[in-house]
Amino acid sequence: MERPAVPFPPSPWHLTGDMIVSLWRVPVGELPPWSLPSGTRPWIVRRRATLVTFWVDYRPGGVLTYREFLIALVVRHGRRLAASTVAAWVDDERSLAGGRALWGIPKERGAITLHAEGRSARGELTVPGTPTVRLTYRDVLRLPCRLPARAHLFQQLPDGEECRVPMRISGRPALGRGRVMTGAEDPLSALGRHRPLLSLALRDFRSVVGS
C-alpha cells in the first residue's frame, strides 16, 4: 500500500533558531560512498575532501519547528566551487518530505537533540541500527554583531533534474571548539577520528531556503 503524501510548506522556507557549524578536511578514502548530482565532483586538495556539518534547532517563528543534522560536501560544478548535501537527518516528517521533493536533499528520519547551556552546547543523533553520534561545542569568542551570508546547494531531484537551492541567513556568531564522537564502525566514523578545522555557533539566526 502506497504511503500517503505528507503536506509541507511551499518554497521558500523561512526558518529561525540556533545552529552549530563545523568545517572539516577528511581523507578521501575515509568518506562513505555518497552519491552526488551529475555534473559535480568532490573538491579534493592533497587527497582530502572538505565537509561542512550543521547541527540545527529550528524554533517557533519559522514555517517549521524541528531539529536537523546535515552534512554538505564541497564540490566542483563546472569551474565553480559549490556544496551538495550528501546526508541529512531530521525529526519531522514534513521537513523530510519537503526537503526531498522540493530540493532533492536526501533527508532521513532520526532522533536529534541539541541543548545549549550558556557558552556550551551538546547534541545527539540516534538512528536505529547505528551507534549514537554525539556533538560537544564551546564558545571561544563571541562577535558583537549580526552577520549575513548567502550560499547555495546543488542537488538532484527524484526525477533526475538538477536543482540549485539558494540560501540566505543572518545571525549572532561565535567562534568555538567542537568535537564529534561516533562509533568505530559508524558510517560517519571519519568525523570521530578527526577534529574540525573550524567550529562556530550561529544563534538566533533567520534564514530563507529556496526561491
Image (cartoon, rainbow, N blue to C red):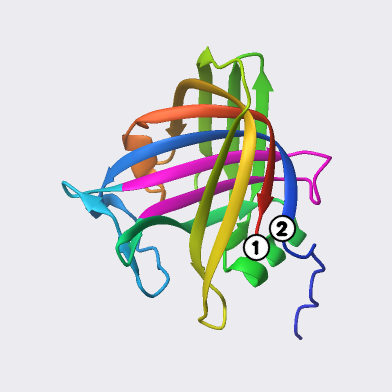
Between residues 209 and 33, which one lies in front from this camera angle? 209
> Which amino acid type is shown beneath numbered disc 1?
Gly
- Does any portion of residue 118 appear in the rendered image? yes
Q: Are marks 2 and 1 in contact (CB under 8 Å)?
A: yes
Between residues 139 and 124, which one lies in front from this camera angle? 139
Residue at the spot 62% in from the left edge and 41% down from the top edge: 169
The residues colored magenta run 50-74
Residue at the spot 56% in from the left edge and 17% down from the top edge: 143
- Does any portion of residue 132 appear in the rendered image? no
- According to the picture, the residue beneath numbered tag 2 turns out to be 95
Residue at the spot 61% in from the left edge and 47% down from the top edge: 168
Q: From the viewer's perspective, is 160 left or right of 78?
A: right
Residue 186 place in picture, x, y as percent: 41, 48
- According to the picture, the residue beneath numbered tag 1 turns out to be 99
Between residues 173 and 37, which one lies in front from this camera angle? 173
Classed neighbour count for the residue bearing mark 1: other residues with Cα under 10 Å, few (<14), some (14–19), many (≥20): many
Residue 166 place in picture, x, y as percent: 58, 57
Magenta span main SS:
strand
State whether residue 177 is above or below residue 22: above
Instruction: Quarter of the image for the C terminus: give it.
Output: bottom right
Is-magenta flag for residue 8? no
Residue 99 place in picture, x, y as percent: 65, 63
> Which amino acid type is shown beneath numbered disc 2?
Ser
State whether residue 64 is above or below residue 94: above
Residue 65 place in picture, x, y as percent: 78, 46
Mark 2–mark 1 Cα distance, whole angstroms, equals 6 Å
Is-magenta flag for residue 57? yes
